Every structure is written in structure tokens, then in C-alpha cells.
Amino acid sequence: MSETIAAISTAIGESGIGIVRISGNDAFKVGYKIFKGAKVQKEEDIDNRKLTYGHIVDGEKIIDEVLIAFMKGPYTYTREDMVEIYCHGGIISVRNVLNLILRSGAGLAEPGEFTKRAFLNGRLDLAQAEAVIDIINSKTNKSMEVSLNQLGGTLSAKIKEIRDILFDMMAHVEVSIDFSDEDLDVSSIQDLEDKALIVKEKISSLLSTADRGKILRDGLKTVILGKPNVGKSSLLNALLRENRAIVTDIPGTTRDIIEEYINIDGIPLKIIDTAGIRDTSDLVEKIGVDKARLMVEDADLIIAIFDISRKLTEEDMEILDLISDKNTIVLLNKVDLSQAFDEDYFKNHIKNKEIISTSISNGLGIDKIEKTIKEMFYSGEVEVKSDIVVNNIRHKNQLEKAYNDIESFIEDIKNNVPIDCLDVDLKNCWRNLGEISGETISEDILDKIFSEFCIGK
């Protein structure tokens, strides 16, 4: 925290503007050393928090023409003195500016170090800090909306509300422990149980949003499954509205996994085209088929395609077995061709699956597929427009631990467990919730969280 740090904060590549950030006690010192104003000649004449035009210079050599902002802490992103340099975009210009800054006394920032300093200096709590990277990685407007709400502190406020109830309960229990000659009376025990049930309900309510939040954050993992030449790659191309996968009449064209993201009315789909399910002597294709079978296990949704212009085969029956207990949309494809498929037999062997007739090559049924995905996503679920959606797997894990703790507390009360044991459950619950906001967390976990950030943020 004592070192002044610097990093490029915009994506590397050709662009109109590149931004280099400096933060720390010596940020102004470094900035004054390398900046020469076009009209402002003295350091004291440079306005705080206003853009100033000039050049980044290495002695007498001009490195780039820039705008620069000197921002005095604590009213900055990190709550430290900060300098932001707006230079020309492109790999060479921003790297030359950064290299000069590093030679002038700053150190290269680690991934997420600016946001980590914002957390350590009290500008953001940990849940808000994690929302920053979620905003950057958002794949749809809805996922960004959820992350912006979290950055605004909606989840943190709910966690604080629950922890405040737990704190009151802990105080009550600990007073009773201090005066151990006085047992808790019946009304006090009932009051603790009532509050514990409130805590349990509030944690449960947050957990109920976690599956939806995971999908908004990471995408609905959607596997396209079928035997060779049923139209899997054609479906991928149709959903993407571009020719992403090679389509031929040759069986086994797709040999490896192809992954792409698409957006269906705010629902991010991580859509995966797989190798056709069949027995093959081709080693490379066999590896692809084995991967396809494994993908089914982790899929949130399967789109299983069957070719009704051909008779049912052993491969089709294997696919039916694979999808028997999975969320699946079944496509009966190539309805534009003469039918050799025993559709009645097929439907008798598949239950509780949405079945759509399609001709993917002609675009028939694509709108119905998208509509069905949307209906499956929203039906019976908590609305995405809810202010609080848990979209972080770490938060979900901590909530599950806290839920188990409060359940244990409630069970212990019913079983008349000694009061000092009740205190243990309450403290564990309180600590586990505190790890979400960062009020009770180890340095190792902090380092791991911020190592997943990009450098410069």
C-alpha cells in the first residue's frame, strides 16, 4: 500500500484513446516529473480534477500529446492521490507512457490492485469490489444491471441487515454466558428462535436467486446434441446469425467443441456445438464424441436434434438416455423432407420435454426455439428485475454456510443445547456472512479474489 502503482487501464490494441493510471503517495510527484503543459508552466497552476493539455516528456523528448488529470485523494477511486493520462490509443503510445512512469518511480500494479486499494481504504466493501469485475465481464444488459445494483451496495445492505440481527442475538447470548448462574427464560429462548427464523428466511431468499444469478453472470450453458448430420452446426449458425461452424454433408465434420455466446432478450447463452454422437474408428472424432457426452453432465440446457427424414437408430436411443433427466428442448428437424421417422413411437419414449418441429436450413422454428428458451428461463423463477440477485459463486457458498449455521442454531435451541454452544453457531453464521462484504476475511482469500481482475482496474 505504500508503493505508488501504475498500469494501462484500457484494452491493448488500436483505439482513439488509451488511459494510463497512477495511484499512491507519489502519484503527483511522478506526474509532474513527466508532464509538460502547453500553457501551464508551474505545478501549482494545474487545477485539481480538471483536464490539462500538454505532453508527456522524457527530458527534452516528447513521448506523446496528452490530456492529464491530477486528482487529490480521498475523493478518487482508490482514495489515494491519482493521476490519469489520456494519450493516443495503440500499443506503442500507451506502453511508452507506462514505461516512462515506471522509470520515474512508480511500480507496476498487480491485477485488480486499484480496486483492492479502494476496498482496503474503505471506499468499497468486498461485494461491491467484486461487482466491478462483473460489470466488466457482463454479457447482457440484464447481467450488467444486476452487477450495477451490487456495486451500489444492495447486496451489502441486505447482508448488513442480517448481521445486525445476528449481532443482537450474540449480545443476548453472551450476556447470559457472562452471568451463567442465570438461565435464559422461556421468553428469551423464544425470542432467539423467532429471530433465527427471520435470519434463515432472509438467507434463503438470497439463495433462491443464486441459480438465476449464475446464469446471468456466466451464461446458460447450452449443449447442442445429436448424431452426425442432423443440423447441429446449422442451428449454431442460425442462432448466431453468422456462419461460425463449418456445415457439410460429410458425417463427422465437427470434431471438437465450439463455444459461442449469444443474447436472447437479455439471457446470455453459452452455446456449445458438439461432435455428432456415434461409434467411430477415427481417433480425433472419438475424442470429440467423448467430450460431447461429458458436456451433457454439466449442461444447464440441452437442445437435442433428431432427423425425421431418417429412421431412429441406436445413436438416437443413446441420446434419449443422455437427456432423460436433463432440461431439454427436443428438435424434430428436416420437416421439409419426406418423413421416415416414427414420431409416435418417439414421443412415447420421451416425457416432459418441449418438442419443436424445425427445418433449420430454411429458418423454420428458430423463433420458436428462442421463445421456448426464454419461457423456460423465466417460468417459476424469481424475477431478474429484483434489486438483489446473488451472481457470485463465492457469495453463494458463504450464504450456504451461514444457512447451515443458523439451521444448526435453531435445532440446538429445540434440543436444549447448552448456551455456550449456541454462541458458536451464531458467531459462525455472522463470520460467514461477513466474508461476503469483506468484514471478516483473510488476506489469502483477498489475494485470490483480486488476482482474477484485469491489470489496470
Image: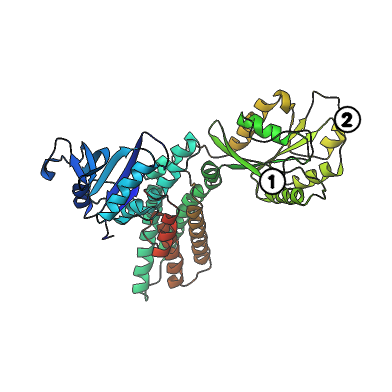
Q: Which of the 4 image quarters holds residue 388?
A: top left
Q: Residue at x 40, y 41 (%)?
A: 149
Image-quadrant location for residue 377: top right
- Kindly report the distance in space between the C-alpha atoms of the residues bearing marks 2 and 1: 29 Å
Total marks drawn? Answer: 2
Residue density around tag 1, few if under 14, some if 14–19, many if 20 or more, within 10 Å: many
- Give the residue number, with chain letter if any, for mark 1: 256
Q: Is residue 72 left or right of residue 276?
A: left
282 w.r.t. 398: above or below: above
Q: Nearer the viewer, residue 76 or 34?
A: 34
Q: Is residue 288 left or right of residue 82?
A: right
Q: Which residue is mark 2?
A: 340
Residue 379 location (% of width, % of height): 61, 36
Q: Is residue 48 left or right of residue 440?
A: left
Q: How is the image coloured?
A: rainbow
Q: Amino acid at mark 1?
A: Asp
* Any part of residue 152 in sight: no
Residue 328 point in image, percent of width and height? 70, 40
Residue contact at pointers 2 and 1, CB within 8 angstroms: no
